Each structure stands twice: as C-alpha cells, then as structure tokens.
Image: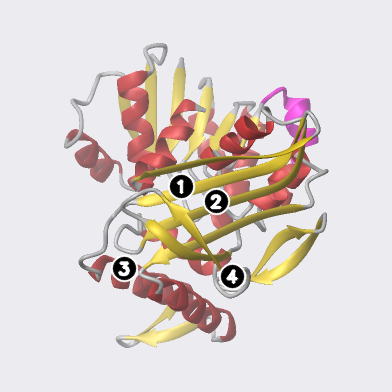
Amino acid sequence: MKILVLGCGEMGIETVQDLAANAPDVDSILVATRSPDKARASLSQRLRIPESLTFFRVDVSDEESVVSLMAGCDVAINCTGPNYLYELPVARAALKARVPLVDLNDEYDITPRMYELDTEAKAAGILLLFGLGGCPGINNVLVRAAADQLDSVEEIHTAWVMSGADPGGRALSYHLLHSLSGPALTVMDGALVEVESFIDGREVQEFPDPVGPVEVFHVGHPEPLTLSRTFPSARTIDNKATFIPSSVNLLIRTLGELQRRGPDRIPVHGRLVAVTDVMAGYLHRYCKSLSGVPPEAALRVTVSGRIRGRDKTIGFSSVGRLASATGIPAAIG
C-alpha cells in the first residue's frame, strides 16, 4: 500500500509515525509539506527514518500539484490546516485523482460543503472520510459504540477539553478563531439552532484525571451536523468544550470578534499584515507562554435512549495528548 500524507505539523507527525510503526501492509509513505526538511528533522527525533518514507515540498492550494502527488497512491491523508482553507481544495484533488481521502476536518461551516461532494465521490468510486481526528473522530466512533447497545437514541452529548498550554501548531489557532469565536449550531428539540460559542449551554461535566470537573459550553464544531444525519430521531445533539485555563475561551472570542470587525490588514512594524495572521499569532504565543497548566486533553461522550422498553444512558471518557489523539485516528482510518 502506498499512502500520501499531506501536512506534517504536530498532527501529521503523529499520523506518519503511527503508519511507519504499526502498519505492516504500508510499503511506501509520501510526506508532502511546505517544509520537508523540517518535517524530516522532526520525525528523525522520534523514529529511524525508513527507506519507505520520502519527503516532498507542496503547496496544497495548488490543486494540480496535489493531484500529481496523489497519482498512484492507494489513499491520501490530509493533515494540513486550517481546514477552512484547505479542506475543499484537497478533497477536489482527491476526486480528480480518484484516490480515497481521510482528513481531520473540524470546521462546522465546511462540513455541509463536503457532503455536497457525495455524488461526485460515488461517481469517482472513492471514499471521502472526513472529520477523523479526536473531536470530531474518536467521539463520533464512541457515539456509535454506545448507540449500538440501544434500541433507540434520544440524546447525544459530546464534549472535550483542551489544555491552553498544548495548543498544537499555529494552524490550530486559525481554526479556533474561525469556528469557536462566535455563532455555533446545536440540535435542540430535533432542530438545528444557533448558539454562541463559550457563552451558551454552560454546565459542569466530569472528565478523567488530571482534568476533573470543568465548565463546558457550546462551541462551533461539526458533531451536531454529522451526528444528526446518522441519528435523525435524536432530539438533543450537542458538542461542548472549554480550555484550561478558561481565559483562553475569552481570548478566542475577543480576538475572533476583532478579526471579523476589523480591517483585513493592519500595520505591523511598518508593513501591512493580514489581521488573521496577527490574531492567530497572538493566540498561539499566549498559549505557548502559559505555565503550570497540565498538557492533557480529554473527551466525554454520553448517549441516552431506550433498550427493551427501559431508559438507558451509556458513557465513555478518555484523556491524553491532543496531537496523538488527532493524528493516530487518521492513520487508522
């Protein structure tokens, strides 16, 4: 099997490492990124680079270049970010190359547009498997594991906690400001309704140690959209989250609002810089400067329904590091 991995940041490194270590049927791994030398150096600190692993430079916004790299591959894995910029171009390249695609999409506004590619994917005879990271990804799989033990599903609750001190690469900061700083969607009484990220739906949920009980809120994530398609009878489907410390929640909302209301570019050291770059850079630096904050992330899933005429609730929870919880599911996919 020949696999192309697009992007080799903190998530992509985990994907490549897992494939190299745990996938004996993989004969060749192509790693395509903006900085192949940096990717090679990062991976060499974790594993002995096998001959089957080769590195290429690519601009994923150049569709034809991506199509060319995909040619002859059995599957491609998209670990580039932010997803709102690169999700659709990479998916279109996969359709053109007729290569199955796995990705980490966590943008709720891109999710409906990905579903619109279903007819083309069927015509091309390929699978587009999107949203297979930690959240979304692991939590969706756990919802299915719970639902399979029930006769009917009435409520689905998914939640996650991120450590502000473990913010991933800078691409994740762009995602946070794009999707988690304003309106979001959730399912209430069987209908999609709009809520405000990090404001609405506040409640305390219990996560495994060392996270423990924390306040979570509705956030802009795809789970209410994807799970409502699979479980249309569910009256409530939500995805809630928080950062530790909670000051990161407020910073995301504040920077995101400034980004949306401000000019496209602002002067920085005598030159005009895209405001999105300034805000994402500030958020990333702030998180990296945090000290004394445990690095673990966590997730929680509870599904309620009926079995043999009786009410039943089934729950799962997990704790670990963000990068591995995101990159390894993509490798498995």
Mark 4 or mark 2: which is in front? 4
In the rendered view, how is the structure colored?
secondary structure
Give the mark count: 4
**Helix, strand, or loop for circle 4?**
loop
Indicate which disc, 3 or 1, sits on the residue closer to the N terminus. Answer: 1
Q: Which residue is mark 3?
A: 287
Tell whether position 113 is magenta.
no
Disc 3 from disc 2: Cα separation: 24 Å
Kindly state the secondary structure of the residue where label 2 is placed.
Answer: helix
Residue extending farthest to the top is 25
Indicate the amino acid at tag 2.
Tyr
Q: Which residue is mark 1?
A: 80
Decide: few, some or many residues near mark 1? Use Cα within 10 Å; few <14, some 14-19, many ≥20: many
Check disc 4 and give the amino acid type.
Ser
At label 3, the amino acid type is Cys
Mark 4 and mark 2 lie on one chain; the one further toward the N terminus is 2
Find the magenta span and give its range. 117-126
The residue where tag 4 is placed is 197
Question: Quick check: 186 left or right of 9?
Answer: right
Label drawn at residue 86: 2
Quarter of the image holding residue 119? top right
Q: Is residue 129 visible?
A: yes
